[in-house]
């Protein structure tokens, strides 16, 4: 990706619901703080949310940020993505009920 400091790609097997492999590319001509932030962001995005956000400045996936650790929101998103109680095909109401039980 042109002008990107980091980039991640992965292959996903729908039949087994598994990530089969992935690659993370990071430019090496940046300072260590920025490089560490980009590495964390790219690994996070391979495991979950694949798009950046312009909404949460404290998030590791904030488009214009340089965050050095996962925020509470980042951690909550990842817990929800891997929550075994939330399954494909659930209605919004069913999912929201589980989210309320977990987080409220």
Image (tube, grey):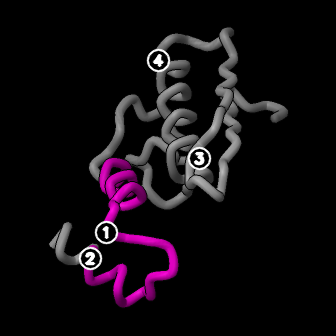
Name the image quarter holding residue 54: bottom right
* Residue 77 falls left or right of residue 41: left
Quarter occupied by the N terminus: top right
Quarter occupied by the C terminus: bottom left
- Residue 38, given in percent of the width and then of the height, sits at 55, 28
Name the image quarter holding residue 5: top right
Q: How far is disc 2 from disc 1 in space, using C-alphas?
A: 7 Å
- Residue 101, given in percent of the width and then of the height, sits at 17, 75
Residue beneath the point at 53% across and 25% down:
39
Considering only order in the chain, which callout, 3 or 2, is on the residue closer to the N terminus? 3
Considering only order in the chain, which callout, 1 or 4, is on the residue closer to the N terminus? 4
Residue beneath the point at 57% across and 34% down:
42
Which residues are the magenta region?
73-98
Name the image quarter holding residue 27: top right
Residue 28 in the magenta stretch? The answer is no
**Which of the two residues, 64 or 93, is positioned nearer the viewer here?**
93
Please give the residue where the numbered disc 4 appears in the rendered image.
Answer: 33
Q: How far is disc 3 from disc 4 in space, using C-alphas?
A: 16 Å
* Residue 70 falls left or right of residue 12: left
Please give the residue where the numbered disc 3 appears in the rendered image.
Answer: 63
- Residue 43, given in percent of the width and then of the height, sits at 52, 33
Residue beneath the point at 35% across and 33% down:
69
Please give the residue where the numbered disc 2 appears in the rendered image.
Answer: 98
Q: Residues within 10 Å of mark 2 (few under 14, many from 20)?
A: some
Q: What secondary structure is the magenta-colored segment mainly?
A: helix
Q: Do labels 4 and 2 touch, CB within 8 Å? A: no
* Residue 6 falls left or right of residue 35: right
Please give the residue where the numbered disc 1 appears in the rendered image.
Answer: 85
The mark closer to the camera, 2 or 1, is 1
């Amino acid at each position: 990706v042109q002008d990107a400091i980091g980039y991640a790609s992965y292959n996903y097997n729908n039949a087994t619901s598994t990530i089969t492999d992935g690659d993370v590319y990071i430019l090496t001509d940046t300072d260590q703080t920025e490089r560490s932030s980009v590495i964390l962001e790219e690994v996070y995005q391979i495991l979950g949310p694949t798009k950046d956000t312009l909404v949460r400045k404290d998030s590791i996936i904030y488009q214009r940020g340089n965050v050095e650790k996962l925020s509470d929101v980042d951690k909550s998103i990842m817990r929800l993505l891997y929550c075994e109680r939330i399954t494909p095909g659930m209605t919004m109401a069913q999912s929201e009920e589980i989210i309320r039980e977990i987080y409220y």
